[in-house]
Amino acid sequence: MSTIYRKYRPQIFSDVTGQDHITKTITNEIATGKIAHAYLFSGPRGIGKTTLARLLAKSINCINRKEGEFEPCNECISCTEITAGRSIDVMEIDAASNTGVDNVRENIIENAQFKPTKSRYKVFIIDEVHMLSTSAFNALLKTLEEPPLHVIFILATTEPHKLPATIISRCQRFNFKKVGYDQMMERLMRICKEEETKVDKKVLERVINKSDGCMRDAESLLGQILSINLKNIGPEEAEMILPTSNVQTVIDFIEQIIGNKTAEAINLVAQLVSDGVNLEQFAYDVIEILRVIMILQSDSNAKNLVTDYSEANLKMIKKLSGQITPGNLIKIIESLMARRREIRISPIPQLPLELFIVNFTTNAGGITCHPELVSGSVAVSQKDREILKQVQDDTIQDIKPAHNIAQTIKEKISDFTHKQPVKSTLEDVKNKWEEIIQKISVENHSLTFILRMCNLEAVDENGLHVTVPYSFHKDKIDEHKAKKIIEKSLADALDERIFLHCGLCASAAQPADDENLNELAANFGGEVVN
């Protein structure tokens, strides 16, 4: 038995699904005899580019087609040979396998000089034409620009942006679109009727959603379902072929995330794992609907946005768009995209999704926009804000999902405002300074040269005070990451936390020690210019 998508490949223009904007133009050209010498068919895979190219070749070479008509008869010797792929005047070339200039010269340029053997036109269908090399395009260009009257080129590609502008400008271009939900459903139901098999509409909906607007994928999936060889096929029978995840499951998951229903969302993921659903694909499906929600929030009347959702599903998606703010929606999409990449490498496949759920249903990820902070119910002074900024990275890492964010911030501020008296003396720091520098060099080699130029001024209740000769040295030490490394090394060497305060020395305008400055410049790949 032939595969469904081959068995039901359109043999006349009226059978082509979802490309009316193209078939209407081409059939008018055929009927009026105004055939272009070169066509460019571009668009996603599996939506009819090659099929329409063959129909065009068949129609213009049909012996029985009368003037003013456009449909091929499918009975004459020319039609039957083209349908069977035996016509010596219609050549299909896979550019992915014939990328070089020599192949273009032998298969196309030289061949184009000879008149067709049996047909009216010699037709070259070049599939995946974007794969041709630059030299091959250059060789093809002259023939494409001024082809013999008996030659027609049909170029097909999924990536038109890779074609040279000189090639595109010499073709009549047609952009193919993904097939819409209603059109795809109508065609699948017609195939089921021809196959004398009743397939539940829910199964067909899942086929459509899984195929992402690709008619060939939809027909291929349907063929697998029909191979079960039952007269009535429902969701249960189709489960062995189709993933159990469907649009309704995805919508339920998004509702649970928006509604902060942690347990329900985790249980849903557990059920998906139990059913053998591909979690990476499920995450992709969720992202796809979240994207639709985002666009609907920007324009509720967005046209041609959704092509493969039923009216009922689209209604639920529109309802969800009013239940989440744009800011939170963006955070969820960005987080889920990151978590999806982790699924494949995670030791527990569902763990990234579970982390995503806990993060967004317990407010663990909402520290920057928590309602208590926005409303001002947490009193934070300007000094406290500066301290909070310094320890923000540590704070975020310490937060537990169920922990109150405002309380966490208060605890961190308390840690930094109630400092313990410093026991170490300036002499203690000087004795340990070289050891501290050596330790720092492991994590940040460039800091060591600046620290060797520091003057250790004093140690008091606020910490260690140092001065440096240049302002760019001070800026480097005051960087949060650099200061954190230095303070950690101080704590390790002196067994207590000591805060670092850096200033400019009184002689900051004077040149620094030549030896140290030359060493510093060399380590940064430069030199001192007098």
Image: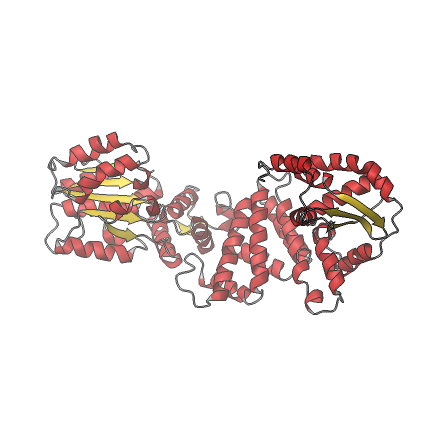
At x 70% / y 52%, what residue is drawn? 396
* Image side of residue 475 versus residue 284, left or right: right
User: Where is 84 relative to 47, above or below?
Assistant: above
* Image side of residue 77 versus residue 204, left or right: left
Report x, y in % for residue 201.
44, 55
From the image, which quarter does the C terminus lie in?
top right
* Image side of residue 454 versus residue 139, left or right: right
User: Where is 73 relative to 113, above or below?
Assistant: below
Report x, y in % for residue 490.
80, 42
- Residue 101 in view here: yes
At x 25% / y 55%, what residue is drawn? 23
The residue closer to the viewer here, 199 or 21, is 21
Report x, y in % for residue 282.
54, 49
The residue closer to the viewer here, 124 or 425, is 425
From the image, which quarter does the N terminus lie in?
top left
Report x, y in % for residue 285.
51, 52
Quadrant hosting residue 443: top right
- Residue 277 in view here: no
The residue closer to the viewer here, 465 or 519, is 519
